[in-house]
Image (cartoon, rainbow, N blue to C red):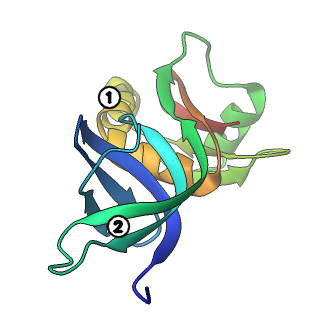
Amino acid sequence: MTDEKESTFLVTHVESDSAVLKDVHDGQVHTLSSNPGLDVDDAVEATVAPDPPMEVTYQVIEVAERRSLSIEESPEPPTVHERELAAETETGELSREERAGVGEVHVLTPPESETEAAVADVIDDREGTLSRAARLGVNRVEVRSEPGVVAVRYLP
């Protein structure tokens, strides 16, 4: 098959007999004609191919890796380093930094009155946030905040 596609996918919807995968690199959505045991919020490194003859649905040819992803809001405040990054970042902007080891930290600097809304935006954009986690190769996203600082931690 020449139309095989190997990538990292986020499982966005499942039923007993089908699943929907979103390629976290190009955003393409693939509806599977069967569900090989996947769950919503799984990240899968897989190879998919279109089902003949119509090629409107796909099948999973191989799953190289599968991991479950999660997002949680932590009661902990941002770390000292995250606060320092925020201090160097203009209000309303985003700062990104690789973590030692695996993952990244994104520090947002909303106006203090909009901090809770910024946290809610990150958590509510589940597909976008988890797609980023899948691209980064991490399993969990932790959101920490205090007025004017939101730290989105992409962790192994």
Of badges 1 and 2, the one in the foreground is 2
Residue 46 image label = none
Q: Secondary structure at mark 2?
A: loop
Q: Is residue 70 left or right of residue 77?
A: left
Q: Dot 1, crowdedness within 10 Å: few (<14), some or many (≥20)?
A: few
Residue 120 image label = 1
Q: Is residue 39 left or right of residue 83?
A: left
Q: Which residue is mark 2?
A: 27
Q: Is residue 110 above or below residue 44?
A: above
Q: Dot 2, crowdedness within 10 Å: few (<14), some or many (≥20)?
A: few
View extreme (top): residue: 75
Residue 147 visible? The answer is no
Mark 1: amino acid: Ala
Q: Residue at x 42, y 60 (%)?
A: 60
Mark 2: amino acid: Gly
Nearest the camera: 40 or 34? 34
